Image: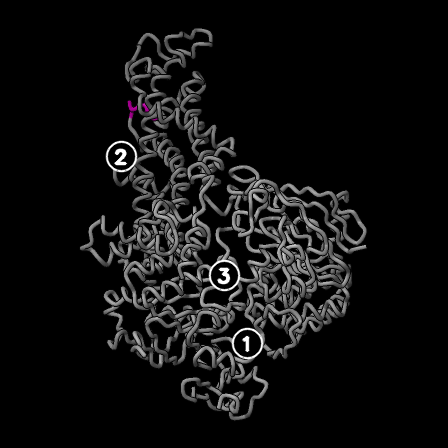
């Protein structure tokens, strides 16, 4: 029984020129204590699916799903109040911009204590003690003094630690981190990623890491789901994904990494991610794929089996068939 | 070896900060003494974290800001603010954000022709257009894109347009301020290829500003690592990546995520955060975060030393290995 | 090498279904606001009347039918279909006066907005680009103008210049100008931070080019909204000045002046005050609704997708 189970989730946005499908039939499972990375470029819908889960999308979004359950509870048929009790408690989220996620008018101490009061109903003294304990847990030096600081008085890395402290305040079962280190420098990024991994080890919570950085994925995640233009195109354990990607998109993306370059010129992926106005009829990657044929352009491929990384492709790469032929 | 097209010596840039009506103004040293040479056909990369002064350096080279101290020379002649108008043709800049760097109210054609209208007044309208269309083709866009507005293009295409505009005046030096960090991975590689192709074809000297070591490793010929406004290490790319001498370079390299899962690697964990550039510590700026700090590090500023591959450290790493 | 070039070639262009043009997108957002569309239609009628009023009006607006003074509207007892909305104390046709009066209000709006906006935009651009001390001086002057109640200041100015429609317009334009200065300055400041301005500088653009070619077109959206809203303020202020006897002078069929002339007949003949009042109300309301729609459509911060 997985902690989070999503089946056939789609999200549509109403825009100036008709509906735009940001998330398209995504299935996703997250188990207790695992680190799942959702990786994709901009417009891949990687954040939108998780925001839909948290109920944080604007009113223009229409969410449809066959199943969306968390910790055995059905989120689809739950009333708003019950849902609010879960979100922020058992299900927490941190965002890319720690500076704008914190309210600049209040001290970080006030903000963390406020969330402790709201969710746990602790008294004044207990709140203070718990806040200090949390700050220590996320490695903020001199917590007593830092509680009185305003967000703008601290660096981005420290603010992200505060956000993490607030997110884990209620001992969530699942923490969703949406590009938690994109706004930070690499040396600070390394610290934050280490912190997230060690918190997972301590508390046994599940961790969903949304990112576009393949390096972060390789170093932190255990399982990786690759999204492209709103669809999940592949999902594999991290080592297998980097060694034997099955979807041509994943393979091309890994080849394009400057780090893996063997030649002066890098392998490229022609074209751009399809937008609202040029969404292909068949496989979404077919206009850019070097293996695509008429069938790919006409019919959307269904996901393959687990041995082929659930790749949405008729002609997966690194499969035995291809090697044989 | 060709002669350098641009040379910078002891370049510094200070800002007077704050104060307001009654407060005291303080001096922020964004860049504190950097030397480098730019050679045609070569790429010099400047890497560092936010606040290290790399963008200020780029803006000084692109003649957007005047150096407080030090000299900048182009083809052996000093670059002085009164000559900027003439010298600008030779140095152009490409910015990080392709959404902010193109005027949303101008057509691509007008964006490309603007530098010519300003600087080549004698050029006829037909010649300008022909040159603009040629440039568009050179960066891999189609001539019919000439009459469209920037909002009709994707991020990667906009960056191509920004590059085309920078090349309209046939510059010798192009400053690339994080040109690919706002782009998706699949677009990034084609822009990097384009930049390299243009460099080979037009014999350009690049000053490539980046925070991403994996990109720098691919594009650079030489490398400067900056920390709090100072160059802490400098040298040919291969040497710096193989034998980082400054502890900060080593830490930066080890913190950069690699795409080989489970690769055994010793990660150097830096304690603490970047000090504020308003309060740069005495002595070596890296001393408060360094794991091998000695008392003399806190007292005096180490200078760059050691030939082609040099580091500003009293106790550099891997002395023996670099021979 | 050749390989990459061809790769670039097919990589770059996206053709296929065009993205919607800016105008279509604008219309989509504007249309969503029903009040704005109604406002636009009323404004269109108003503009039409302003342009062609004298040819549409059934009677000469200044012709006095001495036999038919204070005739009630047609549907009331004693009314006549010759004078649909009745006549005023001097026997002039109300409907004709209202129709022809539209052009004065429209004229006031256009002139005031043009004068205030062009002056305000130029001063705003200057302050945005000028050194800090110039900026401070100009902005403090603007603050002083804003510190006066606007109608009072306009009254004082008209009292100095002498009462006439032209002077009223000048006074209102001066009073409205600081809003444009502030708005332009704020947009200029935020646009100056953007890379495309720096990029124009690197290309060697001079100050004039930076101001008018590079920056100004990108500041226009909020200014257009402000122009629409101050159009209605101008009409209202002109009517108020007219009512106080400081604007258009009789026998001009200006709506505010009409109100003032009819003041003493309020109890006897409701129509002489009600119709000019309604005309002002409907026009101002329509323009304000339209302005809100413009803001929704032009201000990207309020866009909902």
Q: Is residue A202 above or below residue A89?
A: below
Is C252 inside the magenta-drawn segment?
A: yes
Give the number of the disc on residue A267.
3
Q: Is residue C47 above or below residue B3?
A: above
Q: Residues within 10 Å of mark 2 (few under 14, many from 20)?
A: some
Q: Are marks 1 and 3 in contact (CB under 8 Å)?
A: no
Is C154 inside the magenta-drawn segment?
A: no
Please tell me whether the stretch drawn in magenta is mainly helix, strand or loop. Answer: loop
Place of residue C294 in the rendered image (x, y in percent of width and height, measured from the top left): 44, 38
Residue under label 2, please give it.
C166
Classify the position of the C terminus of chain C by image quarter. top right
Q: Are marks 2 and 1 in contact (CB under 8 Å)?
A: no
Give the number of the disc on residue A83.
none
Left or right of A193, for residue B242 = left
Secondary structure of residue under mark 3 = loop
Give the magenta range: C250-254
Q: Are marks 2 and 3 in contact (CB under 8 Å)?
A: no
- Chain letter for mark 1: B
Q: Nearer the viewer, residue A272 or C40?
A: A272
Place of residue C199 in the rendered image (x, y in percent of width and height, measured from the top left): 35, 59
Left or right of B35, for residue A54 = right
Q: Quadrant of residue B173?
A: bottom left
Place of residue C90 in the rendered image (x, y in percent of width and height, measured from the top left): 32, 15
Residue sitting farthest toward the left: B122
Residue under label 1, please give it.
B253
Q: CA distance from mark 2 to mark 1?
A: 73 Å
Place of residue C287 in the rendered image (x, y in percent of width and height, measured from the top left): 43, 33
- Chain letter for mark 2: C
Q: Are marks 2 and 1 on the same chain?
A: no
Q: Is residue C61 above or below residue B84?
A: above
Residue at 49% in and 35% down: C28
Closer mark to the observer between disc 2 and disc 3: 3
């Amino acid at each position: 029984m997985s902690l989070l189970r999503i089946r056939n989730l789609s999200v549509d946005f109403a825009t100036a020129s008709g509906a735009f499908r940001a998330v398209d039939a995504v299935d996703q499972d997250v188990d207790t204590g695992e680190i799942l990375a959702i990786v994709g470029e901009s417009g891949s819908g990687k954040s939108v699916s998780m925001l839909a889960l948290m109920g944080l999308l604007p009113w223009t979004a229409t969410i449809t799903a066959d199943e969306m359950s968390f910790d055995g509870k059905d989120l689809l048929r739950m009333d708003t109040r019950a849902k609010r009790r879960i979100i922020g408690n058992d299900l927490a989220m941190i965002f890319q911009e720690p500076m704008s996620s914190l309210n600049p008018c209040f001290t970080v101490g006030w903000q963390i204590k406020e969330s402790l009061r709201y969710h746990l109903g602790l008294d004044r003294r207990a709140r203070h003690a718990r806040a200090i304990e949390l700050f220590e847990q996320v490695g903020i030096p001199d917590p007593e003094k830092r509680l009185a600081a305003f967000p703008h008085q601290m660096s981005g890395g420290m603010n992200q630690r505060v956000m993490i402290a607030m997110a884990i305040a209620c001992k969530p079962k699942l923490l969703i981190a949406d590009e938690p280190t994109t706004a930070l420098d690499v040396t600070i990024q390394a610290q934050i990623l280490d912190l997230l991994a060690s918190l997972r080890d301590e508390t046994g919570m599940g961790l969903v890491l949304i990112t576009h950085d393949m390096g972060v994925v390789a170093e932190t995640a255990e399982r990786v789901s690759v999204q492209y233009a709103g669809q999940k195109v592949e999902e594999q354990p991290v080592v297998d994904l980097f060694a034997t990607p099955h979807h041509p998109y994943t393979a091309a993306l890994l080849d394009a990494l400057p780090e893996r370059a063997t030649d002066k010129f890098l392998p490229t992926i022609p074209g751009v991610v399809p937008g609202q106005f040029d969404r292909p009829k068949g496989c979404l990657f077919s206009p850019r794929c070097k293996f695509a044929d008429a069938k790919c352009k006409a019919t959307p491929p269904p996901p393959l089996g687990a041995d082929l990384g659930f790749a949405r492709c008729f002609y997966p790469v690194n499969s035995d068939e291809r090697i044989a032929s | 070896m060709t002669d350098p097209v641009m040379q910078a010596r002891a370049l510094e840039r200070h800002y007077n900060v704050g104060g307001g009506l009654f407060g005291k103004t303080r001096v922020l040293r964004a860049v504190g003494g950097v030397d480098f040479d730019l050679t045609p056909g070569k790429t010099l990369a400047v890497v560092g974290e936010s606040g290290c002064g790399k963008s200020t350096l780029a803006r000084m080279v692109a003649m957007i800001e005047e150096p407080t101290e030090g000299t900048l020379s182009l083809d052996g002649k000093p670059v002085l603010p009164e000559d900027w108008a003439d010298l600008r043709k030779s140095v152009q800049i490409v910015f990080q954000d392709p959404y902010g760097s193109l005027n949303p109210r101008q057509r691509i054609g007008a964006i490309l022709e603007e530098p010519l209208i300003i600087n080549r007044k004698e050029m006829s309208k037909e010649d300008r257009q022909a040159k603009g269309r040629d440039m568009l083709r050179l960066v891999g866009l189609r001539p019919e894109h000439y009459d469209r507005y920037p909002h009709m293009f994707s991020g990667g295409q906009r960056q191509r347009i920004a590059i085309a505009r920078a090349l309209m005046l046939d510059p010798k030096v192009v400053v690339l301020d994080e040109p690919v960090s706002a782009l998706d991975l699949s677009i990034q590689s084609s822009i990097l290829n384009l930049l390299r192709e243009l460099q080979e074809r037009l014999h350009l000297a690049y000053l490539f500003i980046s925070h991403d070591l994996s990109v720098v490793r691919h594009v650079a010929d030489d490398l400067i690592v900056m920390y709090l406004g100072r160059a802490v290490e400098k040298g040919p790319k291969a040497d710096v990546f193989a034998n980082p001498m400054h502890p900060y370079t080593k830490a930066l390299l080890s913190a950069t995520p690699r795409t080989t899962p489970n690769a055994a690697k010793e990660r150097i964990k830096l304690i603490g955060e970047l000090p504020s550039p308003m309060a740069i510590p005495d002595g070596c700026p890296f001393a408060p975060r360094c794991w091998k700090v000695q008392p003399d590090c806190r007292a005096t500023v180490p200078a760059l030393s050691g030939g082609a591959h040099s580091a500003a450290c009293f106790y550099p790493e891997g002395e023996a290995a670099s021979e | 090498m050749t390989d990459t070039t061809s790769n670039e070639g097919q990589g770059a262009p996206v053709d296929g279904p065009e993205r919607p043009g800016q105008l279509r997108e604008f219309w989509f957002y504007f249309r969503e606001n029903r009040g704005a569309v109604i406002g636009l239609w009323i404004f269109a009628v108003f503009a039409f009347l302003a342009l062609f009023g004298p040819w549409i009006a059934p009677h000469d607006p200044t012709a006095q039918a001495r036999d038919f003074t204070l005739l009630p509207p047609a549907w009331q007892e004693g009314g006549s279909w010759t004078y649909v909305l009745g006549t005023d104390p001097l026997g002039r046709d109300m409907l004709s006066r209202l129709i022809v009066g539209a052009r004065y209000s429209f004229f006031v709006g256009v002139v005031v907005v043009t004068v205030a906006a062009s002056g305000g935009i130029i001063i705003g651009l200057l302050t945005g680009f000028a050194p800090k001390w110039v900026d401070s001086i100009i902005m403090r002057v603007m603050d002083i103008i804003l510190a006066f109640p606007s109608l009072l200041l306009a009254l004082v100015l008209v009292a100095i210049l002498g009462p006439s429609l032209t002077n009223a317009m000048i006074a209102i334009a001066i009073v409205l100008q600081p809003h444009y200065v502030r708005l332009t300055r704020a947009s200029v400041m935020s646009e100056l931070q953007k890379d495309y301005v720096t990029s124009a500088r690197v290309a060697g653009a001079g100050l004039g080019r930076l101001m008018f070619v590079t920056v100004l077109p990108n500041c226009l959206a909020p200014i257009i909204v402000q122009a629409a809203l101050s159009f209605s303020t101008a009409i209202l202020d002109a009517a108020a000045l007219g009512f106080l006897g400081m604007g258009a002078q009789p026998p001009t069929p200006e709506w505010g002046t009409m109100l003032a002339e009819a003041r003493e007949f309020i109890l006897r003949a409701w129509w002489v005050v009600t119709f000019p009042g309604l005309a002002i109300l409907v026009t101002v309301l329509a323009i304000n609704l339209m302005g809100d729609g413009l803001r929704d459509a032009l201000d990207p911060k309020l866009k909902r997708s």
